[in-house]
Image (cartoon, grey):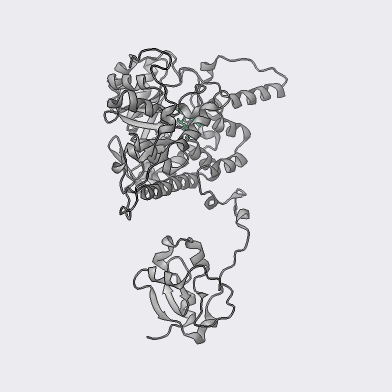
Amino acid sequence: MAKIDGAEVARHNTKKSCWLVLDSRVYDVTSFQSEHPGGTVILLKNAGTVIFSHSLCLTQPPNSKKYHPLTYVKQLPPGSDLGPIDPNTLAKLNKPKETTSSPVNEVDAENKIPHVSLCVSCPDFEKVAKSVLPHKSYIYASTSANYGLSLKGNLEDWGRITFRPRVLRNVGDVDASRKIFGHNSPYPFYISPMGTLGTINSEAELDVVRGAVKKGVHMVVSTASTRPTTQIADCHRAELQRHKGSPTRLFFQYYMPVDRTKAIELMHIVKEAGYKGLWITVDTPVLGKRTADRVLQAEEALAVGMHEEPTSTWETGDDNAFAPAMGGRPSAGQLSPHTTWEDLSWIRKEWDGPIVLKGVQCAEDAKLALEYGVDGILLSNHGGRQLHTAPSSLMTLLEIRTYCPEVIGRLEIFMDGGLRDGADVLKALCLGATAVGVGRPYMYALAAYGGKGVEKVTDILAEELTTGMRLLGITSLDQLKPEMVNASRLLNEMWRPDSFSVRSKL
Ligand SMILES: Cc1cc2nc3c(=O)[nH]c(=O)nc-3n(C[C@H](O)[C@H](O)[C@H](O)COP(=O)(O)O)c2cc1C
């Protein structure tokens, strides 16, 4: 076999064509890059160089460190071994690329923040967002009810359920796709509705749509969005044209206006704009006590020599604290504290698509939702922003499994709150959820990196999810079963009808 010239090897130094010399032979590792346990970058850094060599007796090549035995080469795909290197041409090989700066100093040139690739888990985005957002906007995103226990419970409960993985299953190919009301998505998670994203920048809501469509993730759009409902839908349509085949669909989060004429009018606008479902928020008859907001308001009042005046909570609006200032919808009238189950019958007459109740927090209401004929329930405590010590969505799901399991399978069940890891999504699905919503991680990523941040969060969750599937021993989401999790710690704490010697009315 003809020997390969070092100059030829040196030319193949890109992601599209990556050659290396391992011992005395040349290997094409292009297709192996994504599978390399040490990552792609280390291969690219050494593209066109000699990695290590015993037989060529290179005494001290700069990169002669041996990370693994040469037998690993056998794992390269067939055809990777291109032949022997010409030992007289070694000088023509590239020098390995040296790292120029410490990775922690790698910054997004424009914004002077860590490069987006340095965010590898969802919680990483909060710190960056905090450094770029105006203080008021960060408080708005991060605030929670009272002294924070609802939020804390949301974050912690995911970790209190553990997996019961199966081994020795063929998990080579996995499929993480899931349908929400018949609309396919590559993932069983979606972007939760968040009001007033315009507090980040005027393009923020459109940036989320752009990122979502690029990745095919579904999205629920808030009534309290800064941009008009119709404009967000137009942007979605335009993006679908640009990214043909993207399955992303928009659903609408509905804060029902008190005035019924306005409520119906809004539903018609939403329907005409092409939204695929109405997610009625039912956990906000009044605004919860947003403690950090209160402190900020008091500080602002004191700064202008005033004492903060207590306000009537429901008149201050919910998740649109900035709406008037940002040109969004006026806050008063967005929440209706007077809404009851009976309202569902006239809503149903006006809206013929799927209806989801967002904010169900106990088994009794899950059962009522089924009786009142809605299509889905979203177990949620509003990201810990409403009732103090509200149950996490996992706790509510366990209650439903115990006291009204008939709901599962007859309604689409969604959950949100504190979800920060793709593997945790699997726990929700094991226990009967259709899909899971993710809120703040998307908001923080959006604040830090715009649409690219939205894409990155989706990628992070998707990778954790598919890795989790393989390690759990499954290849598709319909193989998930309750036996694959150990929920005994949460079950021990679950509400029991006899805890106070009362009979269950369930
Ligand atoms: C900044 C912010 C704004 C929100 N705005 C709304 C809203 O307008 N309507 C709504 O139903 N829920 C709203 N939520 C609640 C989310 O839809 C979702 O229930 C919650 O964020 C999920 O928890 P997570 O942020 O821990 O993922 C908001 C949450 C945040 C953090």
Left or right of 502: which side holds 328? right
How many numbered marks appear? 0
Left or right of 153: which side holds 466? left
Q: Residue 43's spot in the image, x, y percent?
A: 49, 66
Q: Residue 31's spot in the image, x, y percent?
A: 39, 65
Q: Residue 394's spot in the image, x, y percent?
A: 41, 31
Which of the image's four quarters has the N terminus? bottom left
Which image quarter: residue 297?
A: top right
- Relative to 452, say whether 370 is above or below: above
Residue 267 in sight in this render: yes
Which image quarter: residue 184?
A: top left
Front residue of 207/33: it is 33
> At 30% across and 54% down in the image, what residue appears?
170
Front residue of 250/381: it is 381
- Relative to 26, say whether 87 is above or below: below
Which of the image's four quarters has the C terminus? top left
Front residue of 356/362: it is 362
> At 42% across and 15% down in the image, what residue appears?
258
> At 41% across and 35% down in the image, what residue appears?
437
Left or right of 366: which side holds 500? right
> At 54% across and 75% down in the image, what residue appears?
94
Residue 235 in sight in this render: no
Q: Residue 434's spot in the image, x, y percent?
A: 33, 35
Front residue of 456/327: it is 456
- Relative to 261, say whether 119 is above or below: below
